[in-house]
Image: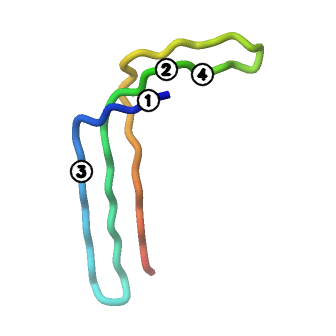
Amino acid sequence: MTFEPFKERVAKTNLGIIASEVHQMFGRYSGEAILENGEALHIRGLIGFAEEHRARW
């Protein structure tokens, strides 16, 4: 599976003892997934996102 990003969203909050930083990448997934029955599901241009979130509470 490959991911081709087209938009990044960043949100940061720092209130001293409480802090958060989120990076979200929106883009398109392409490739194939193998189903439980062994069949290949071909995916082209499926829009989705991936994110990284760091938080201190």
- Mark closest to the chain's N terminus, 3 or 2: 3
- The residue drawn where x is 38% and y is 39% is 49
Cα distance in 3D space between marks 4 and 2: 7 Å
| Other-residue count near label 3 (Cα within 10 Å), few / some / many at <14 / 14–19 / ≥20 | few
From the image, tell me which residue sits under label 2: 31
The residue type indicated by label 3 comes to Arg
Quadrant housing the C terminus: bottom left
Dot 2 falls on a residue whose secondary structure is: strand
Whether residues under marks 4 and 2 lie with C-beta atoms below 8 angstroms apart, the answer is yes
Find numbered disc 3 in the image and state the secondary structure of the residue it sits on. strand
Q: Secondary structure at mark 1?
A: strand
For discs 3 and 2, the disc positioned in front in the rendered view:
2
Q: Which residue is mark 4?
A: 33
Q: Quadrant of residue 19?
A: bottom left
Q: Amino acid at mark 1?
A: Thr
Up-down: is 45 above or below 6? above
Name the residue at 49% across, 20% down: 31
Seen at 32% across and 67% down, the residue is 21
Q: Are marks 1 and 2 in contact (CB under 8 Å)?
A: yes
First along the sequence among labels 1 and 3: 1
Q: Amino acid at mark 2?
A: Gly
The CA distance from mark 1 to mark 4 is 11 Å
* The disc label shown at residue 2, or none: 1
Residue designated by label 3? 9
**Is there CB contact under 8 Å for labels 3 and 2?**
no
Q: Looking at the picture, tell me which residue is in the foreground, 15 or 44.
A: 44
- Answer whether labels 3 and 4 touch (C-beta < 8 Å): no
Distance Cα–Cα, label 3 vs label 2: 24 Å
